[in-house]
Structure formats: C-alpha cells, structure tokens
Amino acid sequence: MEKEMTLISAKGKLNGIWGEAVNPIEGMTPLVILAKTGDKDQAYWLSRYLNDAGILTFTFEAEDAASAIRGYHLAFDELRNDDRVASEYIVFAGYGEAGNAAAVAASEIGRSVRGIFLMSPVIKDWDKIKGYQGRSYIVAGSDDDQAPLASLEMMAKKLKQGELLQMRGAGHDYREEDWERAGMLLRTWVLTGLN
C-alpha cells in the first residue's frame, strides 16, 4: 500500500510516497529511499516492486542533483527512527542523476547508510563519493553513452565495497526488461547482500 507522506524537519520539508511492505517482518524491515529525477526514471515502479517483496520504500521527486541530495538527507534523518524500519538496513537507490545524488548523500552521512544501489549513475562528484565505506552495487548498461561502462567499472574498483553488474544490451534509457532486471537485482541485494 502506498500513501503520500510529508516529512518535516529543521532542514526543510519533503513530499514523497511511503510504500508499505507486503508481509513485513516486524523490526526487521529494510528501507530503500529512492529519488526520481527525470521522466525516464521508474522509481515509483521500483518502489512497488520492492514493497511486494517485503521492503519498505520512501520515494520522492527532485528537480536536480542538489535537491535530491537534500531529500536523501532529510528522508534518512526522519525515517531512521521509525518503528517500522530496521535502521541498520537503510539503502539509498537512484538512476542516472539520482544515482550520483544517492552516492553523495550516503558518503556525507557515512556508514549509517548501509548501502547504495546505483543504476547507470551519471557521476559528477567523484571526490565526494570515493570515501563511502558502505556496500555499493552499481548496475551499468553495456551500451550506455552517458554513464560509460569503463568509468563505472573503475568506480566500483575504487569504492571500498564496490560491486558492478553489467547489463548487456542496455543503454542509458532502460527498456522495460532492464527495469525489471534492475528491480530483481535491487530486491535480491537488499534481502541477501547487505550482511
């Protein structure tokens, strides 16, 4: 079940969609925070996919990378103490520009963000990202002209706990089957790969 939620703190206000997990394990439910930054970004679809797998989500729209970074910070600060959330299993996820924002925000917050799941991230802030100590999973399209595979391979190697998966035949604009594969990977990684 999804519902509109407004988070309010001293840092500001953030409107988003709270996605309830189907059949959650009380006190053990991971949370994935997703930012949507473009028309081709399927963050809401990913949210519903994760909810069906027993994972909580908070999804918000951002105009640009800077507002997405602020949104990740505010959502993390406000939701980590929610009784429904296993606070040690909070993940930031993002596609394209939101991937860069997720990585920057997680790096600024530190290890309290258990992992980042980046889908074809357009990395603009490597100096801010390279110190991130948590788990990092990067999905790269083999034919992506905006987030080149070679650059993302190098990024995965330089991150302390970086992993990369290449989706053969995928470009930067994911096809429906690419989104389905990314959703399956994210679900599996959150449920099994964060330990």
Image (cartoon, rainbow, N blue to C red):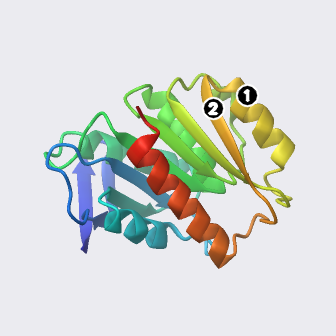
Q: Quadrant of residue 158?
A: top right
Q: Residues within 10 Å of mark 2 (few under 14, many from 20)?
A: many
Estimate the x, y position of residue 88 in percent, counting from the top left.
30, 33
Q: Is residue 16 above or below residue 92?
A: below
Estimate the x, y position of residue 139 in percent, counting from the top left.
66, 51
Distance of mark 2 from mark 1, alpha carbons? Answer: 6 Å
- Residue 157's mark? 1
Q: Nearer the viewer, residue 38 or 111?
A: 111
| Amino acid type at mark 2 | Gly
Q: Residues within 10 Å of mark 1 (few under 14, many from 20)?
A: few
Q: Nearer the viewer, residue 133 or 10?
A: 133
Looking at marks 2 and 1 on the same chain, the residue that comes earlier in the sequence is marked by: 1
* Residue matched to label 2: 162
Q: Quadrant of residue 128?
A: top right
Q: Residue at x 29, y 39 (%)?
A: 77
Q: Quadrant of residue 80?
A: top left
Estimate the x, y position of residue 118 in percent, counting from the top left.
60, 48
Q: Is residue 14 above or below residue 26?
A: below
For label 1, the SS is: helix
For label 2, the SS is: strand
| Residue 65 visible within the image | yes
Say which quadrant the C terminus sits in. Answer: top left
